[in-house]
Amino acid sequence: MSNIIIYGSHYGTTKQYAEELSKRTNIEAISFENVKEINDYNNIIYLGGLYAGGVLGMSKTIKKINTISNKKIIIVTVGLSDPIDEVNKKNIRDNIKRQIPKEFFEKTKIFHLRGGIDYSRLNFVHKTMMKLLYNSVKNLPEEKQTSEDKAMIETYNKKVNFVDFSSLDEIINEI
């Protein structure tokens, strides 16, 4: 079986996970921007950072796959919010469902990992988006704040890193 790890990372935590997964499995890891042909691979493991509800590079990568019939696809999201929270998981899965064809979604195994953020490294657009989001949720009554909102309020304008390589074990078992 031929395998590949493809990742979409803007600020680096997803790339860290992809490189560690590559090291542990001896599967090549490559950025989605550098992927040319993926139809020869039986197992495609896609790690993507969560940005504004989307998974970076995932839909572009999935579009390159001609047929899913003989493939195993694993999608791993990396985001700031706690992946154990069921509401977060449902929101992420709903967003993935909107980004990829139904037949792919139904056959795909999905995992969620926690990443990090360093506001000092964000580009202007991402800083502006985060500030607008922060301002929209900080004054919500606490009972209306989701766990994702609370995590964003707690970490706003800080550097936090929740990367945990032991969380790759379940993905390795699936591979």
Image: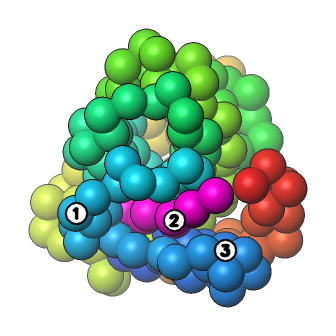
Q: Residues within 10 Å of mark 1 (few under 14, many from 20)?
A: few
Is 118 situated left or right of 135 in this image? right
Principal secondary structure, stretch drawn in magenta: strand
Q: CA distance from mark 2 to mark 1?
A: 13 Å
Pointer 2 residue = 5
Question: As shown in the figure, which amino acid type bears the numbered disc 1?
Answer: Lys
Which residue is identified by label 3? 21
Q: Quadrant of residue 164?
A: bottom right
In depth, the one of 25 and 136 nearer the eye is 25
Q: Amino acid at mark 2?
A: Ile
Residue 19 visible? The answer is yes
Can residue 118 be seen? no
Sequence-wise first label, 2 or 1: 2
Within the magenta stretch, is there residue 141?
A: no
Q: Nearer the viewer, residue 115 or 36?
A: 36
Discs 3/1, front: 1
